[in-house]
Amino acid sequence: MKRHSAHPSAAPAALFVLALLLGTLAVPFTGRAAAADGPTVAVSPREAGTGGSTTVTGRGWRPRALLTLLICGQNMIGGTDSCANSDGRAVTTGADGTFRRKLPVVDPPKPCPCVVHVATVTGDAAAADVAFRVAGHPVKPLPTERTGGERLSVLSARLDGSSGPLTWFGAPPRRTLVVTVANLGSTPARDPVFRVGASHGVFAPSWEERQWRGTLEPGKKAQVKLAVELSAGAHGDYVVSLKYGRTLLVEQPWTVGRPWGVTFFWILLCVVIPAAVFRIGMAVVDKVRPRPAVSAAPARTAPTRRRARDATPLPWFTPDTLPGPQTQHPSAPSENNRPTPKGST
């Protein structure tokens, strides 16, 4: 009986230890999942009046990141214009991406519902909001979202890209207009359509529409890249302009080099074609010109004339003094006048 009664008491103890172990192991995984979902923010208490304070805590942020803490009205749908910017606080996250900071409670410029807005100051943009009630501050319904309330502004602009070998021979020059655009309005800009144009001298720009895919929330900024292309053979000083609606956002100068390859090609063409025509004309003339009649006696060639000239005696060699057998003196006996030896007939 004692042996059988020991089993029921041992089983609950084993289950309790196993549940405690699983609960202990589940805590780190829960924290990791929360961090993977992005930065989070919490406040305590969730309601306080003007002059009080609330403690803001966060986790899942980038380590050693500088953050700003603001109390905003209307759920911050109007951007930072609806926040108490002068009474905000700054905090730097720890090595584990967490922070803890007290925030004084003040009345935001817009009515509630209110939020505590936390955002990064430098580096990759990240933000998070948490609901907060300012005691005694008026509460009004949120304004209905209307179109046309966005107001875009360019913070910086540049032209990226370079000319390739084909541009040197008259191909259309191409660049990428990179602008940092901020939405200063009260409504988000969804898939905004920009107008890009390039002007040269006194001529007006020819506008082309470029749509950027994305949503730019109020108070946010984003980098927009738009392609710009000129006509073939374009060169000189140009101005690239960017418009949103009727508002001119930015003008960026662009100096395009002359396509010297085209000039070299025309110079080469002007030299080669006349030379080719001249050669063809000379070949035709050589074919159609009349030939002289051929005589019976062969013409003396240059080597023959040279040999004949070499055979002519020099002027100081007269016929009497030409090299040859020695002539006898007149007083010398000739062969016929030589005396006959005796005894010969």
Image (tube, rainbow, N blue to C red):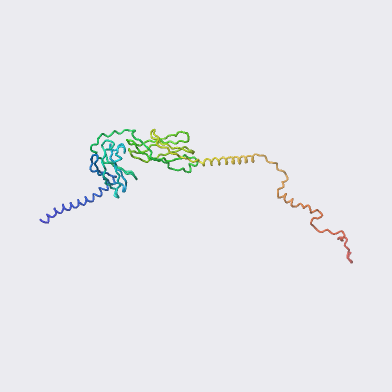
Which residue is at the far bottom? Answer: 343
- The percent coordinates of residue 183 (x first, y second) are 35, 37
Q: Could you say which is closer to the camera, residue 242 or residue 102?
A: 102
Give the quarter of the image for residue 280. top right
Farthest front residue in view: 51
Q: Between residue 228 and residue 179, name the one nearer to us.
A: 179
Percent position of residue 17, x then y:
19, 53
Q: x, y (%) of residue 286?
A: 64, 41
How many callouts does the rendering have?
A: 0
**Is 25 placed above or below 239 here?**
below
Question: From the image, which quarter does the N terminus lie in?
Answer: bottom left
> Which residue is at the front of the view, 269 or 46?
46
Quarter of the C terminus within the rendering: bottom right
Q: In the image, is 203 to the left or to the right of 40?
A: right
Locate residue 289, reporting x and y percent. 66, 39
Quadrant for residue 58, please give it: top left
Compared with 312, 114 (above or below) is above
